[in-house]
Amino acid sequence: MEPITEPEISFFADTLPSLEDIEKLACYVHSSEANQIKFAEQLEANRAKTSANAQLAGGIGLFIVGRNSEAIEKLQKANDCKEKFIYMALALRRTGKFDEAIENLQNSLKYEADTLNITLEKAATYRQAGNLDSADKELKTCVNFENISAEYHYQLGRLQEAQGLYEQAMDNYKTALELVPSHQKALFYLAYRCDLSGDEEAAIDYYRQITSSTNVYVSALLNLAVLYEDKDQFDRASQCIDTVLESHPNHQRAILYKKDVESSKTMYYDEEKEKRKTHKSQLLETPISDFELSVRSRNCLRKMNIQTIDDLLNISEAELLSYKNFGETSLREIKAILDSKGLWLGMALEEKELPLEKTTMTGTAEHEEEKGPLKNSVDDLQLSVRARKCLQKLNISTIGELTQTTEAELLGAKNFGVTSLNEIKKAINNLGLSLRSLD
């Protein structure tokens, strides 16, 4: 990966660069920690200038480095123009002032801002505000651009994700990439969605496409590192993290990931212990692909990320039947496989029910209130890719199950490091809960 080159842009000159040049400059600034420091110093050096153009450039510059409240204050003093209203809107959106952001985007149209771009930004603003109906209405006005605008398909995909329409979202990300193969945001969200759906090979391929560009896409590199680590490809994982640290040497998450990967490289493997695995453990790990299933059943299970016998023991008949295209025929087929081995759907859930009840049903009002969060999925904790994957491997699906796990049990899982442990502890502490103690 070659470093991104500095654009020949005089940002603090009397005439403001074009919106396209400003975007190029922002990419360069964020490509490394050194560039951010250098640009912040330039902002400080030009801070004393009070002309309208200086206020405009200063406000946009403050937005670029993430100082949004200062950016808004500075931009308010600039002369009215499309650049002022667009960057005011973006800064207001970052600070959660969505109605004001929409108003500023609308004002930019009075100064010849591009109608399509502004409409798409309005759709993004409504989506971030949680107003999905308004976002949908904005995007419907752009449908004439579906054959030429990659950004339209990207924004439509983001909206569909928010609506829970994941397959449609992925289709739109792919369409965006057909129109503009280098559309990094579409690549990133397509990769992330593939990862969540269990298609790790596709996720790796898409993340690699992002990281092969000149720009240092930190989130893509770190997510790719987690996927490589999951496959025991520790050197590749280290290379991804090292690429981040070369440009951002003080990036805290990358520093912690680096420590976790190095620890994974030296983890002790007890061969004798592995050989002593019980027959039941080996059976639970049997891949579904080892059994002769119909194409419909196999496809449904794959889309539900059910890969082993153990996964089937952790899902109920009702959950299977509620899935699209999964019918009674497929259900009977799967139950026959489990019956032949003395197992049944939901078996593991039944085994976990008793200890969970012991910890939640104490008869007090306080514990009655705790039932809710304990029964919620760990997905509600919005954990990082690394932490989420570790919990999946440990077959922990609810917050209640997580609270019945000790720190030692978590740290004993493959590739589970202190970074993930601290993240999980913080997430459940925010709910007033904690991991089980051995005291």
Image: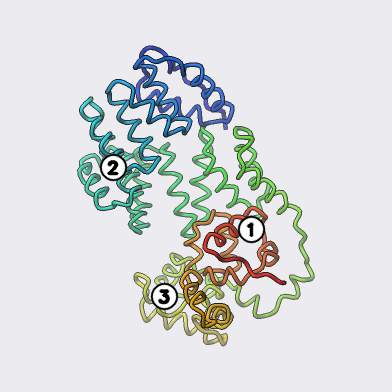
Q: Give me the residue at 58% from left, 30% from top.
A: 33
Q: What amino acid is labelled 3 in the image?
A: Glu
Q: Callout 3: helix, strand or loop?
A: helix
Q: Distance between the residues labelled 3 and 1?
A: 30 Å
The residue where tag 1 is placed is 421
Residue 95 vertical placement versus 399 (above, below): above
**Mark with earlier residue (1, 2):** 2
Q: Distance between the residues labelled 2 and 3?
A: 40 Å
The residue where tag 3 is placed is 319
Other residues around mark 2 within 10 Å, as few (<14) / some (14–19) / many (≥20): some
| Nearest to viewer (mark 3 / mark 1) | 1
Residue at far front of view:
365
**Mark with earlier residue (3, 1):** 3
Q: Pointers 2 and 3 in contact (CB under 8 A)? A: no
The residue where tag 2 is placed is 99
Other residues around mark 1 within 10 Å, as few (<14) / some (14–19) / many (≥20): some
**Mark with earlier residue (2, 3):** 2
